[in-house]
Image: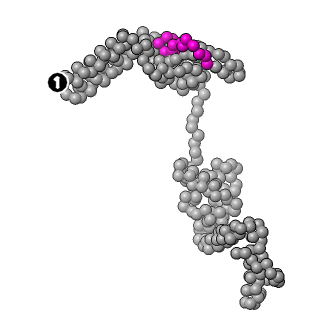
């Protein structure tokens, strides 16, 4: 599309419609020359691509034929969109029509609409519904006492939950910025199991005590630095004999002349007994 830069007259007119057919042709040729020269100056070797995208976009817009009723609806939505005082409000309004209408059509009634805002409105309509207001999740601030916190900390520091390591330290950073070096410890069970056992302990041993909620307990466990044990504690003969005993009982259940449902029930109870002797019995 490189224009011919040879000397040629530049035509100017006050009324294109009053020109004759030949003059209109010459005027369009002169205007095309100016446009091509300007695009080459602005975009260099990409002038052809810019020319196609620029005039193809305008051509698509000019070919849109608006139904009067549809135009009234779009005008109302555009007015509401422009009057919205927040980006999320504009996104909700735009989501009403974004899924059903093309970007070129909507941008013709909302000048300056960026494509990413149009895409965000489509995604919003897909996730929450067209024009639906997203309700933020309800959050409740729960007050707690120092006694509740100390009660749980005493529980997780008890020997059946945590064990001190003979070496190593971890750094505990307080909210004030103070850093404390604490001995490294290891927990014999994971966080979920600790909280379950803590609630069971409170229910059996101090039923009149009100423990903290599970989310607060998880937060405390996350702040208290500790590793979780991944293997059996002290693989000694006592533990090995206990495992062998449960394996023998499991084998005996498999050899019993009873129906499969009863075998499954007995095996389930045996597994629960094994878990109880492994961890829960330490609470007593």
Give the residue displayed 58% in from the left and 20% down from the top.
224
**Of 1 and 143, which appears nearest the observer?**
1
Q: Position of residue 117 (x, y in %)?
A: 64, 54
Give the residue displayed 55% in from the left and 58% down from the top.
99
Q: How many marks?
A: 1
Reply yes or no: does residue 97 show up in magenta.
Answer: no
Find disc 1 in the rendering and name its residue. 257
Reply yes or no: does residue 151 show up in magenta.
Answer: yes
Q: Position of residue 214 (x, y in %)?
A: 52, 24
Q: Answer with left or right where residue 22 lies relative to residue 166.
A: right
Q: Is residue 146 above or below residue 23?
A: above
Q: Is residue 143 visible?
A: yes
Give the residue displayed 62% in from the left and 52% down from the top.
91
Give the residue displayed 23% in from the left and 24% down from the top.
254
Q: Quadrant of the N terminus?
A: bottom right
Colour pattern = one colour
Part of the protein shown in magenta: 150-170
Q: Is residue 155 visible?
A: no
Q: Position of residue 77 (x, y in %)?
A: 63, 59
Which residue is farthest left?
257
Q: Answer with left or right where residue 276 lies relative to residue 207.
A: left
Which of the 4 image quadrants contains residue 140? top right
Q: Quadrant of the C terminus?
A: top left
Q: Answer with left or right where residue 258 lies relative to residue 41.
A: left
Q: Position of residue 36 (x, y in %)?
A: 74, 74
Which of the 4 image quadrants contains residue 137? top right
Crowding at dot 1, Cα within 10 Å, few <14 / some 14-19 / many 20+, comes out as few
């Amino acid at each position: 599309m490189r224009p011919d830069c040879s000397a040629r007259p530049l035509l100017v007119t006050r009324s294109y419609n009053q020109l004759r057919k030949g003059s209109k042709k010459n005027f369009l040729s002169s205007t095309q020359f100016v446009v091509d020269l300007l695009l080459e100056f602005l975009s260099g070797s990409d002038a052809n691509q810019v020319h196609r995208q620029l005039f193809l976009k305008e051509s698509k817009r000019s070919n849109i034929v608006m139904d009067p009723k549809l135009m009234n609806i779009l005008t109302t939505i555009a007015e509401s969109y422009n009057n919205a005082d927040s980006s999320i409000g504009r996104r909700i309004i735009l989501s009403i029509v974004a899924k059903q209408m093309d970007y070129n059509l909507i941008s013709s009634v909302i000048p300056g609409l960026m494509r990413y805002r149009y895409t965000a409105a489509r995604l919003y309509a897909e996730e929450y519904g067209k024009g639906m207001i997203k309700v933020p999740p309800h959050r409740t601030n729960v007050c707690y006492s120092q006694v509740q916190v100390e009660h749980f900390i005493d529980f997780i520091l008890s020997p059946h939950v945590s064990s001190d390591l003979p070496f190593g330290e971890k750094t505990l950073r307080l909210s004030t910025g103070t850093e404390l070096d604490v001995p490294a410890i290891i927990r014999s069970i994971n966080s979920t199991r600790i909280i379950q056992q803590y609630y069971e302990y409170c229910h059996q041993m101090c039923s009149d005590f009100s423990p903290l909620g599970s989310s607060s307990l998880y937060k405390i466990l996350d702040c208290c630095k500790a590793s979780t044990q991944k293997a059996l504690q002290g693989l000694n003969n006592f533990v090995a004999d206990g495992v062998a005993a449960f394996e023998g009982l499991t084998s005996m259940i498999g050899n019993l002349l009873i129906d499969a449902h009863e075998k499954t029930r007995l095996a389930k109870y045996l597994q629960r007994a094994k878990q109880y002797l492994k961890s829960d019995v330490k609470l007593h």
